[in-house]
Amino acid sequence: MRLAELAGSHAEGIVQIAESAINELLARAAGDGTSPTIELRPRNEVLVRYGVVHARAELPAAIEAGPSPRLTLRLASVLVAMGLKAVVRQPYIHIHGRFLTIALADVPALHPWRDGWRHVKQIRFATAPGALRVGVAVAIAPGSTGAEESR
Amino acid sequence: MKDWLEGQLAAGFPALAGTTVSGTVAVNQELLNELLTTWLANPAQNASGAAPAVDMSRLTPLIKSARIRAEPGTVLIDFHIAI
């Protein structure tokens, strides 16, 4: 079924993801016990621990939606940014200054939902005690051709 | 990922506690007729009651309200989900 066949559909809401669940998924993705862990702090601050390295970053309040959304984190330390730039090899991660940008549509783990990004109208982030709140608005516009979607 | 999702589904999605989503699913008559044609074309499969990919009975408690209405050419399903 193509999403375009559901033209006129829409949904809005808050998806609240527990910090423990994010860390469990990170561990499963790494599969070898070397994954980073995160700690969510007030005012959209995220502390990332990876071995002895601790890095603070700030989540944006919102990201621009569209077929190729990008999530840009503001790193607290330029030195950490420089260190990351030297070691990060994933083509969907770009580091510029103290900003780290992830091209969400190009992340392999998110490829199953690649065709759905253009229907996402808004994504907002807010940290809460022990959880990340993601505000999402989705709408499938009448007239969507869905030409690039597969059955 | 799949077994994580299955575990969450069985436990009522504790990792997503606090989630609320509202919306409307619009299904046009062409899609409904296509689904009906497919269903009628596979009587053996339909009679065997093949298990769906998701056990809907586990999702039902998450649906706090639902309403079906119709407009010309379209069936609209309004829903509110809370975990």
Image (cartoon, rainbow, N blue to C red):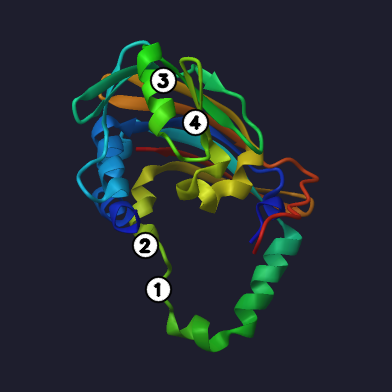
Chain letter for mark 3, please: A
Q: CA distance from mark 3 to mark 4?
A: 37 Å
* Disc number placed over residue B55 in the picture, else none: 2
**SS category of the residue bearing label 1:** loop
Q: Is residue A41 above or below residue A17?
A: above
Residues B40 and A10: in front is: A10
The answer to whether residue B27 is seen in the rendering is no
Do the CB atoms of the residues marked 2 and 1 lie less than 8 Å apart? yes
Is label 4 in a helix, a strand or a loop? strand
Mark 3 belongs to which amino acid? Met
Q: Chain of mark 2?
A: B
Of circles 3 and 4, which is in front?
3
> Does dot 2 land on a helix, a strand or a loop?
loop
Earlier-in-chain disc, 3 versus 4: 4
Residue with the mark numbered 1: B51
Q: Position of residue B29 (x, y in %)?
A: 74, 60
The answer for how far apart the CA atoms under marks 2 and 4 are is 23 Å
As shown in the figure, which amino acid type bears the numbered disc 2? Asp
**Residue farthest toward the front in the current orientation of the protein:** A86
Disc 3 to disc 1: CB gap under 8 Å: no
**Three-letter residue code for mark 1:** Ala
Residue at 73% from the left image edge and 40% from the top image edge = A141
Within-10-Å neighbours for mark 1: few <14, some 14–19, many 20+: few
- Residue at 65% from the left image edge and 72% from the top image edge: B36
Q: Quadrant of the N terminus of chain A?
A: bottom right
Position of the C terminus of chain A by quadrant: bottom right
Residue, disc 3: A82
Which residue position is annotated with label 4?
A: A13
